[in-house]
Image: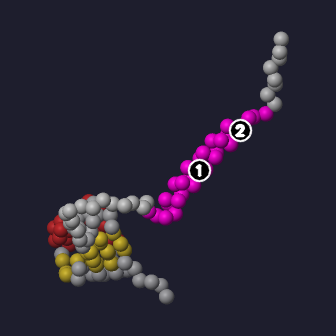
Amino acid sequence: MKSLKKVEGINVVPLIDVMLVLLAIILTISSFIALGKIELTLPNGTTQTKVKQKSYDIAINNQREFFINSEKISKEEIPEKLLELNKEDIVSIRADKLTPYEEFVFIIDLLKQKGIEKIGMVVENER
């Protein structure tokens, strides 16, 4: 009768195989991430529609006055004015440093309710 060999260590060959497969997957995926895009050749179409992005500038001064694209507007009229926006529009917000934070939050809240995600805060560079 033969006796079975006693295992004196862990067989690492399957572990190395798995690690090599994972390394190949990571290297493949990282090339897409490094380029920042996936190259595509798009098919031609007969109809074309260009969607124009609108840019809105909302300003708040230290007297709590609101301006949309340099046009003064009352706080009550802002929700109505923001109905013109769609999700693709870009909104930049400028607020005086002495403006109460609640006014800034009011504007951000209205934009988030509307589903606007492209929001920029305008600041001045330090020298």
What residue do we see at 81% from left, 23% from top?
5
Chain-order first, disc 1 or disc 2: 2
Report helix, strand or loop for mark 2: helix
Q: Position of residue 31 (x, y in %)?
A: 53, 59
Q: Is 24 placed above or below 126 here?
A: above
Identify the image quadrant of residue 121.
Answer: bottom left
Q: Position of residue 98 (x, y in %)?
A: 36, 80
Part of the protein shown in magenta: 9-37
Residue 8 is one of the magenta-drawn residues: no
From the viewer's perspective, is 17 left or right of 118?
right
- Nearer-the-camera pick, 8 or 121: 8
Q: Which numbered tag is attached to residue 35?
A: none
Q: Which numbered tag is attached to residue 24?
A: 1
- Nearer-the-camera pick, 25 or 110: 25
The residue where tag 2 is placed is: 13
- Nearer-the-camera pick, 2 or 99: 2
Q: Amino acid at mark 2?
A: Val
Main SS, magenta residues: helix
Residue 34 is one of the magenta-drawn residues: yes
